[in-house]
């Protein structure tokens, strides 16, 4: 993995992290095209580069994030708990999925149909729209988020869909999804860094430079996306169609180019 690839993947991460299209899935597909998916440093990079984007959330929403009531942080904890526990016990399985572009493409496709269906349901049920997220709703959101352990599903998609199915206001759902990314991605990054160091007992200077560069790029790109393009999240169905098209495209490409046994 070189510096240009680090920059490109950092840009992809920053652009896709906050949209329901799976940033990890996009990076896996891009890394597969680059021919670096099997590298150990790439496996670490795909998770740790997300830390840069959550720093952009903390920076831009610092007043909302650091000056909340205890109730807010408890709900974030409740929503983070299921994926934290499940991610710890299924670590080897999630690592396996990181090397499977076919799984990503399939997840994008299925997730796209789910998003379009949920959006139709949401638009038809305009009554009794609620802004509040209770502890029970937060826990259910956390359970949905566990599906995002499969690359291509999308953490933001699962959390926003869970909110919409519980009739939570869309703006509130997007905001909660943003803040929920902080502990989930932060813990996942620390866990991945620890595992990588435990296996090799060292980080090379190039490893550190590539990781730092990717995170800086994803931080800057993430801020630009939040500032300029986050309003597009209201067009939820549009992302569903995008996922369907992208999923079908990569499924066709992989079946045409790669031997079936590699799937």
Image (tube, rainbow, N blue to C red):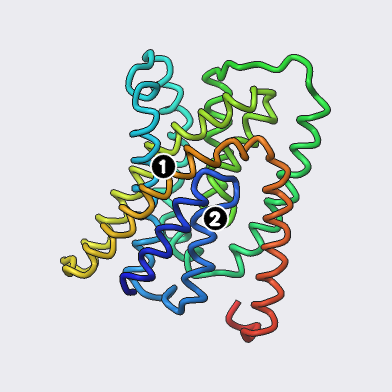
Left or right: where 106 falls relative to 189:
right
Measuring from the top left, give residue 169's x and y in whole percent: 64, 22
Q: CA distance from mark 1 to mark 2?
A: 26 Å
Q: As displayed, is residue 218 above or below residue 157? A: below
Identity of the residue drawn at 53% across and 61% down? 26
Identity of the residue drawn at 34% across and 62% down? 44
Quadrant of the image containing the N terminus: bottom left
Depth check: give the residue in front, 115 or 53.
Answer: 53
Depth check: give the residue in front, 158 or 253.
Answer: 253
Q: As displayed, is residue 196 above or below residue 115? A: below
Mark 2 crowd level (few <14, some 14–19, many ≥20, 10 Å Cα): many
Quadrant of the image containing the C terminus: bottom right
Measuring from the top left, give residue 160's x and y in whole percent: 60, 35
Measuring from the top left, give residue 11's x and y in whole percent: 43, 57
Q: Residue 63 has which mark?
A: none
Q: As displayed, is residue 126 above or below residue 26? A: above
Q: Nearer the viewer, mark 1 or mark 2?
A: 1
SS assignment at label 2: loop
Looking at this view, name the residue that lies furthest to the right: 124
SS assignment at label 1: helix
What residue is disc 1 on? 223
What residue is disc 2 on? 150
Depth check: give the residue in front, 209 or 109.
Answer: 209
Measuring from the top left, give residue 175's x and y in whole percent: 52, 29
Mark 1 crowd level (few <14, some 14–19, many ≥20, 10 Å Cα): many
């Amino acid at each position: 993995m070189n510096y240009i690839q680090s920059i490109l993947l950092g840009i992809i991460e920053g652009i896709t992290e906050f949209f329901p299209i799976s940033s990890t899935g996009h990076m896996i597909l891009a890394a597969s095209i680059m021919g670096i998916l099997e590298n150990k440093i790439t496996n670490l990079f795909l998770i740790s580069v997300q830390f840069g984007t959550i720093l952009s959330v903390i920076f831009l929403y610092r007043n909302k994030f650091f000056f909340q009531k205890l109730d807010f942080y408890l709900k974030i904890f409740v929503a983070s708990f299921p994926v934290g526990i499940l991610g710890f016990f299924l670590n080897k399985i999630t690592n396996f999925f990181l090397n499977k572009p076919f799984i990503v493409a399939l997840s994008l496709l299925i997730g796209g149909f789910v998003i379009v269906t949920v959006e139709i349901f949401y638009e038809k049920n305009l009554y009794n729209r609620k802004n509040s997220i209770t502890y029970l709703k937060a826990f259910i959101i956390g359970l949905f988020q566990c599906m995002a352990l499969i690359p291509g599903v999308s953490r933001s998609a699962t959390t926003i869909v869970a909110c919409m199915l519980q009739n939570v206001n869309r703006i509130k759902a997007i905001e909660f999804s943003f803040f929920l990314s902080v502990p989930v991605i932060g813990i996942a990054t620390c866990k991945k860094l620890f595992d990588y160091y435990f296996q090799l007992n060292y980080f090379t200077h190039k490893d550190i430079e590539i990781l730092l560069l990717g995170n800086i790029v994803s931080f800057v790109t993430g801020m630009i996306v939040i500032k300029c393009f986050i309003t597009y999240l209201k067009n939820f169905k549009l992302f569903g169609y995008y996922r369907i098209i992208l999923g079908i495209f990569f499924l066709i490409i992989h079946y045409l180019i790669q031997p079936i046994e590699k799937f």
